[in-house]
């Protein structure tokens, strides 16, 4: 890019606007299922910036908002994608840190508040980058769009017990987005990567394995503890953990082992412990590398269940898979990767690091539609007891990188 053009663009990035918008979005409570107010804020912001705005109602009270700046020719198109729902609700009594609340606090160059990290800060940077380009008076050959989406957080409905909008996450908004016509050439996804380029991340399979047992009053359990579904679960758990250890060795990606989380165990009724539970469940989050088909995890889980049934034929062992999300990766030689690397170097004066991660993102959805996606976004170290926080300087630098990258890819002049 012409150095004078780059200088002109960077001169239009305004820290005070970044800080003000960051506080605005943090102060809007938007847990999964309650993104409506945040969506309306983003729509007003896009309209005031002069973008063409599309409103996609995902379901009642939830919408995606897309702001489009159309290029003057048929150049390459780039989408910024960011979710509006937050990892927590802000109402959890056990999360007391400033960064777990929907109230922005600025202290010592840091902005604390729910969502600033994951990932409202990125939405701010996207918006301010596009505004800087427009203020600089550049013309783009290609289109640039900003998609603020609902329902990305890793959660899902299950059975008839956990149902409703608050459980419909795991890419529901981005699924709706691409199914309804928003399919750019490539995408920048500003998940909190600490300005590392995440070239690949794992997908996941969520599974339930259950044991069955008798349902009787406490008075009739003496001598029959081995008939309890809880007791039976304790007997199969060692085999489950052995399977986990084997899977983690099998699911190696980029030199790091896989991981399986035992995320939940349920059995019985706390309001009626005078009865034995007829079923006890263990729930597994099985991370699957992007180089492995999800069916490999399904087959491996099925084999585990068959072996458990053979060893314990009277246990009534069941299985259910209720989440399947593939991983995603992008080549280190891709134009988007090379461009972000160069822009990061220009802005921060050092080469960015590359990473692969175990968490999942909406890149899982977009890559299935042929949209090459790179995770690169603002955060300031790992989350601690204070919760989410990002340095203002990081937000400013991220905005600069985004602006220069779009100008380069979309052909600014």
Image (cartoon, rainbow, N blue to C red):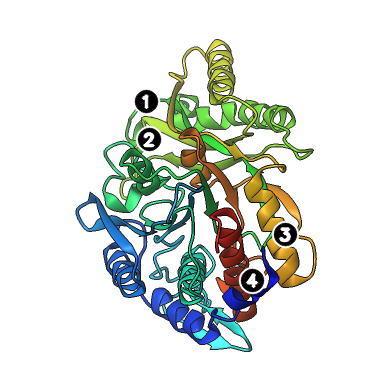
Is residue 222 in sight in this rendering?
no
Q: Are marks 1 and 4 in contact (CB under 8 Å)?
A: no
Q: Is residue 10 above or below residue 123?
A: below
Q: Are marks 1 and 2 in contact (CB under 8 Å)?
A: yes
The answer for how far apart the CA atoms under marks 3 and 1 are is 64 Å
Q: Secondary structure at mark 1?
A: loop
Q: Earlier in the sequence, mark 3 or mark 1?
A: 1
**Residue located beneath label 4 in the image:** 6
Give the quarter of the figure containing the C terminus. Answer: bottom right
Q: Secondary structure at mark 3?
A: helix
Mark 3, Cα crowd under 10 Å, few <14 / some 14-19 / many 20+, is: some
The residue lying toward the viewer, choosing from 296 and 386, is 296
Q: Secondary structure at mark 2?
A: loop
Q: Earlier in the sequence, mark 1 or mark 4?
A: 4
* In this picture, residue 314 sits left or right of residue 382: left
**Residue located beneath label 2 in the image:** 276
Mark 1, Cα crowd under 10 Å, few <14 / some 14-19 / many 20+, is: some
Q: Position of residue 174 (x, y in %)?
A: 39, 46
**Residue located beneath label 3 in the image:** 342
* In this picture, residue 53 sits left or right of residue 319: left
Residue 117 figure quarter: bottom right
The residue lying toward the viewer, choosing from 371 and 21, is 371
The disc at residue 214 is 1
Q: Position of residue 90 (x, y in %)?
A: 41, 70
The residue mark sitting in front, 4 or 2, is: 4
Q: Earlier in the sequence, mark 3 or mark 2?
A: 2
């Amino acid at each position: 890019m012409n150095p004078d053009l780059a200088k002109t663009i960077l001169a239009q990035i305004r820290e005070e606007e970044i800080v003000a918008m960051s506080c605005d979005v943090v102060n809007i409570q938007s847990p999964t299922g309650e993104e409506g107010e945040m969506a309306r804020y983003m729509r007003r912001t896009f309209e005031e910036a002069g973008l063409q705005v599309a409103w996609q109602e995902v379901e009642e009270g939830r919408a995606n908002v897309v702001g489009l700046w159309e290029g003057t020719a048929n150049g390459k198109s780039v989408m910024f994608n960011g979710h509006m729902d937050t990892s927590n609700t802000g109402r959890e009594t056990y999360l007391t840190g400033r960064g777990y609340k929907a109230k922005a606090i600025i202290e010592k160059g840091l902005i604390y508040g729910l969502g600033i990290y994951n990932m409202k800060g990125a939405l701010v940077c996207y918006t301010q980058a596009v505004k800087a380009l427009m203020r600089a008076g550049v013309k783009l050959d290609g289109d640039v769009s900003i998609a603020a989406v609902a329902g990305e957080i890793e959660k899902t409905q299950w059975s008839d017990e956990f149902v409703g909008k608050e459980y419909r996450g795991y890419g529901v908004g981005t699924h709706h987005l691409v199914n309804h016509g928003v399919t750019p050439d490539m995408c920048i996804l500003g998940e909190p990567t600490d300005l590392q380029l995440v070239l690949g991340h794992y997908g996941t399979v969520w599974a339930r394995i259950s044991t069955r047992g008798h349902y009787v009053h406490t008075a009739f359990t003496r001598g029959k503890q081995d008939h309890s579904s809880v007791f039976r679960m304790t007997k199969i758990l060692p085999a489950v953990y052995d399977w986990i250890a084997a899977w983690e060795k099998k699911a190696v990606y980029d030199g790091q082992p896989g991981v399986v989380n035992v995320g939940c165990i349920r059995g019985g009724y706390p309001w009626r412990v005078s009865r034995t539970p007829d079923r006890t469940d263990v729930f597994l989050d099985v991370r699957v590398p992007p180089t492995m088909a999800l069916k490999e995890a399904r087959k491996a889980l099925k084999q585990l269940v068959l072996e458990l049934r053979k060893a314990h034929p009277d246990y009534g062992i069941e299985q259910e898979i209720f989440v399947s999300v593939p991983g995603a990766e992008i080549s280190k030689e891709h134009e988007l990767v090379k461009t972000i690397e160069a822009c990061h170097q220009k802005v921060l004066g050092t080469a960015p690091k590359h990473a692969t991660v175990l968490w999942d993102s909406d890149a899982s959805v977009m890559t299935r539609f042929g949209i090459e996606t790179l995770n690169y976004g603002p955060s300031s170290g790992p989350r601690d007891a204070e919760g989410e926080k990002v340095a203002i300087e990081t937000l400013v630098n991220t905005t600069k990188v985004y602006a220069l990258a779009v100008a380069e890819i979309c052909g600014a002049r």
